[in-house]
Image (cartoon, rainbow, N blue to C red):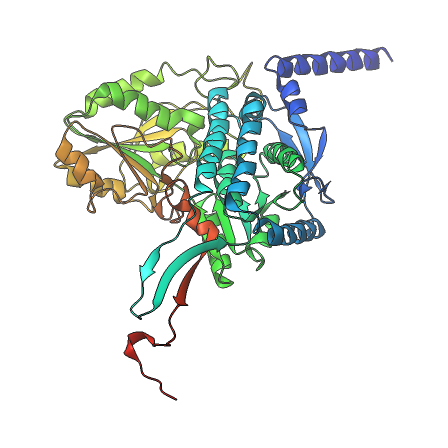
Amino acid sequence: MLMETIFLNYYHNLTKRQKIMNDAFGIQEALKELGLKEINKGSSTGRDCFSSGELLESYSPVDGRLIGKVTCSSKEDYEKVMSSATSAFKNWRTVPAPKRGEVVRQFGDKLRTHKEALGKLVSYEMGKSYQEGMGEVQEMIDICDFAVGLSRQLHGLTMHSERPGHRMYEQYHPLGVVGIISAFNFPVAVWCWNTALAWIAGDTCVWKGSEKTPLCSVACQNLITEVLKENDLEDGISCIVTGNHEVGEMMTIDKRIPLISATGSSRMGQIVGATVAGRFGKSLLELGGNNAIIITPTADLKIVVPGAVFGAVGTCGQRCTSTRRLIIHESVYDTVKNSIVSAYQQIKIGNPLDENNHVGPLIDKDAVDMYQDALTNVVKEGGNILVEGGVLEGSGYESGCYVKPAIAEAKNDFAIVQHETFAPILYLIKYSGGLESAIEIQNDVPQGLSSAIMTSNLKDAEKFLSSSGSDCGIANVNIGTSGAEIGGAFGGEKETGGGRESGSDAWKIYMRRQTNTINYSDELPLAQGIKFDL
């Protein structure tokens, strides 16, 4: 009895200490503010929240503690969601686009109000730094602002007809239900990139967030539901489902979803793309990156070092735009190498909610295993480790997900270098000769997302941006590979999938194009001068 009492007291005190630790960064307050409970329904059409699937537990990679639970979506739950989204589309598409934009504007304001709380949740559930968590919410706000302006600019062209008394124009109509499958590394922003544009386009959305960050999905759904309620709009405009790849498969095979926007690995994208194409649907794929910075002899080291280091270790190397390779000219190789290695000694690893730290944890222990395997493989292939990696242990690292950012000298044709490892491992590759050699090395990987060159030579910069330069969807000069702005279309080529999200004319994929010809004459001339007299 005495031992039992001692154990219960110990357990009580431990639980109390854990709560104090969580509360030190205001986590409990943030969860409450976002409407999150101990157990949350993972299927929602807005006001109506339900789920009959198994219980999914979300543990924080920050401290290994249980944040909350979400019930997964069964097939029946999914059908209920799709029925609501399909029905809501019929009405939502008739709302004038500027009025749809007004709803998105209000959602942006809602995000401003809850920015701190949502930023904390992103940081705690995913493991990125608090600054990055806040930055991700800011991306949501920015795309809402962008979408509001866009809601008055969904215009087509007017064209001259070859037939007298005729005119032609094109217009863009709402597409239907848009399915969004997002990844853990940007658990809220990628959804918003898609959904803000889809909403102003007149589409309804069904979102399956990562099963590794399910509370972020529920929190976002809670916020948009408030906005839809305030505007007396029906359920189905914004929907979520929760679960593993089986729920994603329900979406990819569903003919009621004309567009699937999927973010994840190249392997996942191959499956999604093939499945959706098999039913003549459209895919927007944002897949793997193997991003490189070319460092020329004229590069400014004051720019090189922060750009390369943040690109490699930001979000613990779990950005699709993370810098994986530095391709360095032999004349500056040793100087750059020593500067980068020296900078790595200053990196602080720890709780990402503590703003004194630079790097938080990997998402889970599976990611840790892949990180360790990559370091083993690069040595097996002949690489030279410059900054040792390893898993951190002890106080503050109880989750087992904290690792040391590592640097290795390698060759581009190493199998491990050709593969994207979602972890903070940076490969240094030496090149000689002209810029053409560096570009060839950069392009010689299956992925084609982000790229950069560091140079003070205008000719080198322009060559890098030319048709014979970088083959990536993003090509930067004197900035790193990581971090894209809302105004430009985001996406890449080759095994990155070819999709484009966010700015520029990325909105067009969420709509269907229609060409119209109007005859205002009393005659019916045929195209190409064809005669068909009756």
In the image, residue 299 above or below residue 533: above
Residue beneath the point at 53% across and 18% down:
353
Residue 503, by quadrant, is: top left
Residue occupying the far right of the picture: 1
Specify whether residue 234 is in view: yes
Quadrant that contains the N terminus? top right
Q: Residue at x 33, y 42 (%)?
A: 418
| Image coordinates for residue 30, horizontal then vertical, percent | 63, 21
- Could you tell me residue 508's position as x and y percent? 42, 50
| Residue 182 seen in render | no
Q: Which residue is the extreme one toward the front? A: 522
User: In the visual, does 10 lie left or right of 451?
Assistant: right
Image: 461 above or below 252: above
Q: Out of 117 and 242, give the one closest to the viewer.
A: 117
Query: x, y (%) of residue 429?
Result: 25, 33
Task: Using the image, determine if residue 56 lies above or below residue 258.
Answer: above
